[in-house]
Image (cartoon, rainbow, N blue to C red):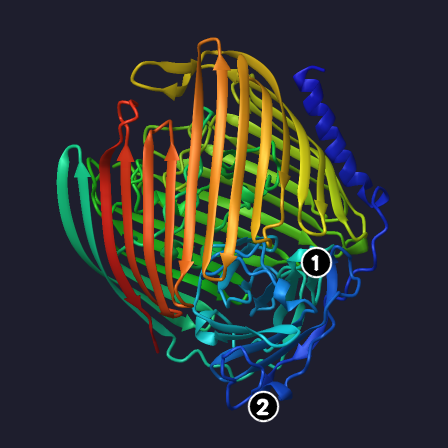
Amino acid sequence: MVAAGRCALWLAVVTALYTTHSLAQETAPASVNTQKQFRAIRVDVPPVIDGVLDDAVWSQAEVITDFHQTRPGNGTPTSERTEVYVVYTDDALYIGARMFDSEPELIAAPVIRHGLGMPSDDRLVVILDPFNSRRAGYRFETNLNAARHDALYTSVSSFSLDWNTIWDVAANVDGKSWVAEIEIPFKSIPFDPAIETWGFNFGRAIRRRGEEMAWVSQNRTYNPSISGQMTGMTGLSKGVGLDLVPSMAVNRQRRYDPVSKKTDYVPSLDAFYRITPSLNAALTINTDFSATEVDSRQVNLTRFNLFFPEKRDFFLNDSDLFQFGNIGGMAGGNNATSQGARENARPFFSRKLGLSQTGAPVDINYGGRISGRVGRWNIGTLAIRQDEFGPVDSSDLFITRVSANVLNDSSLGFIYTNGDPGSNRDNSVAGVDFKYLNNQLSNGRQFEADAWYQVSDTPGMSGDDASYGFGLRLPNNTGWRSRMAYKEVQRNFNPAMGYVNRSNVRDLTGDLGYTHFFGGDVLQSIFSGVDAQRIEVIDGGLQSEVFVYRLAELQTNTRDSVSASYTTNREVVLQPFTLYSSPARQVSILPGDYQFNEYQFSVGTGGQREFSGSFSYQGGDFYNGTRTNLNGSVSWNQSRYFVASINYDWNDISLPQGDFITRLTSVSTQVAFSSTLYWINLVQYDNLSEEVGINTRLQWIPKAGQEGFVVLNYNMQDKDKNNRFESAFSDLSVKFKYTFRF
């Protein structure tokens, strides 16, 4: 079938699914009542956070026990009982939970330090929506190691894992159960004292059984839009509402070719003030990012830019308020798309601030942010003074994002950016967006839609400077689910503080899939579907087309998995681009129309085991040659004090214009000397750059909001690719920061 015919076919299938979806679905149980309520009890004396539910105040709380399965069952009784208690004082919310387990020696807790996700842990999840808006909220997770992981919902269906705030938790095994006690200070989250009812939900996981459970769920999921309610929240105190976070860092850098050394003493100050309980102001002076974790390396076998996520705390706080158009999420989960293509046309990407185009840090002299919610309005405003670097002068950068809650669960918004952190040119971007959400479809279904339009203004670039798009989604964890999205990025659209992966294109994506749950003791679910992306040049002609036929993705109740897929590619290359370069030769893809197909098979084991891993094999054609890809990982969860993992990715590429092999390896270890002192190591190597990067950090967290770091980054490089590595760069940082709360 010709490409245009195939594109029309899959688009017709997705469109037809939207019109007939309610007729082509499996019978689902009645949706869980999303208006469950309980009353939080005010107490005068807070419980002691020690992981033991022996404080008298817990006996005053309502006991929440009506949990149900979301996996493998759907609304069915849980295999183990869960009891949750909630009380509060003027200053903080307290949650106590007892998770009964008939085999406590098998409780999985591979995460041993704070700030990491818990995809393989037996965990307790708490979701708070202090504004009861059903649009956004905060997620808190913990495990038997009392590791803290918090996240910020950037939409009802996605959240930022890198956001963090100050809270406390203790956990312990108590007979045939494990216990967690949580303290969340009201100073740590925005709220409106006039709102006495909060959105609230709980979740729990028992990984060895593949069991997920929740207090309130719909369609096997839960989030701020699918939650119950906590009433009785009165008389809450935010204190003065001022946090002062001074820090001091000593940084010593050394380059070896040419030789240079420098030592910097970097005092910095971050200040956060609650203008109102729901509106925050932040000030940063001489901002320091020396303790930020390093990026994971990627091998680029395309002609387009890679995407690296933001990891700096200052830009992650309230980052949900700066999200525009759900651009990165419109094609989320579509395996035919890359992360760069999904994020293409973002008007604001904070990694453009404080970092040069090569990734070198650029000083931020000072900056301010006002963010939060006032009534129906969501506000995010950021102003930064960035220092000069190289030929680029000092620049003043400004971003404002405002949206209003409309209808039941929808929003209408505006964004404006001004400034160019990477050049001396003027630049601005203005855009509007609309997000629609309907949770009231039959059988617990959802419908989501997004639409957005933006235009840039850059001297010397007139006309063809807009981008726009829309997305439609019927998400579903059981039975049929489908999505489609369209975006156009014109030739001169130039968001200087945003992200553009490719321009002068029309990008059409769609996917259709079906999930079946078995309900047995061994197999949990199987998924099959097709993902597609077609990118055309606005001037005419195809640029890329990808179809991924996800033949079968099988998961067991012990979280083991097997999958098989088949991919068809078509790439129209107009300009040559280099895939591989060494001192002796280069291997490039020449202009042409390439059609090639690949197949993939992968297996994985549940991460709750002491030893776990995954392996995938991908083979087939690659442009005008062939490629074989092997990817594997192994993790050892030795104890709550030591975890190690190794990852390896290998490509053997054979082309008429030359053969080459790519290798990407990373080894990481985590050592917990105690619940407050950690030693983390990461070693990465790839043979394209022929560089070994070593990142080792000693992290001391005596208390949430207090952190000390000793961080060493050391790079070695084989510039001549003769297997002789030489020192290239070293960076040693010692930093401590302390939060004073008033």
Mark carried by residue 85: none
Q: How far across and how far down the image is residue 188, in percent? A: 45, 70
Q: Secondary structure at mark 2?
A: helix
Q: Residue 64 occupies which quadrant of the picture?
A: bottom right
**Which residue reaches farthest top?**
656
Q: How far across and how far down the image is residue 175, in percent? A: 63, 76
In the rendered image, the vertical position of residue 297 relative to residue 702, given as above or below: above
- The residue drawn where x is 67% and y is 82% is 62
Which kind of residue does numbered mark 2 sit on?
Answer: Ala
Mark 1 or 2, nearer chain start: 2
In the rendered image, the vertical position of residue 467 relative to residue 89, given as above or below: above
- Label 1: how many residues lie within 10 Å, few (<14), some (14-19) or many (20+)? many
Which kind of residue does numbered mark 1 sit on?
Answer: Glu
For residue 123, say whether it is visible. Answer: yes
Q: Residue 317 occupies which quadrant of the picture?
A: bottom left
- Label 2: how many residues lie within 10 Å, few (<14), some (14-19) or many (20+)? few
Q: How far across and how far down the image is residue 732, in percent? A: 23, 51
Q: What number of labels is visible?
A: 2
Mark carried by residue 56: 2
> Which corner quadrant holds the N terminus?
top right
Left or right placement of residue 71 versus residue 304 in this view = right
| Residue with the mark numbered 1 | 211
Q: Secondary structure at mark 1?
A: strand
> Which corner quadrant holds the C terminus?
bottom left
- The residue drawn where x is 72% and y is 28% is 10
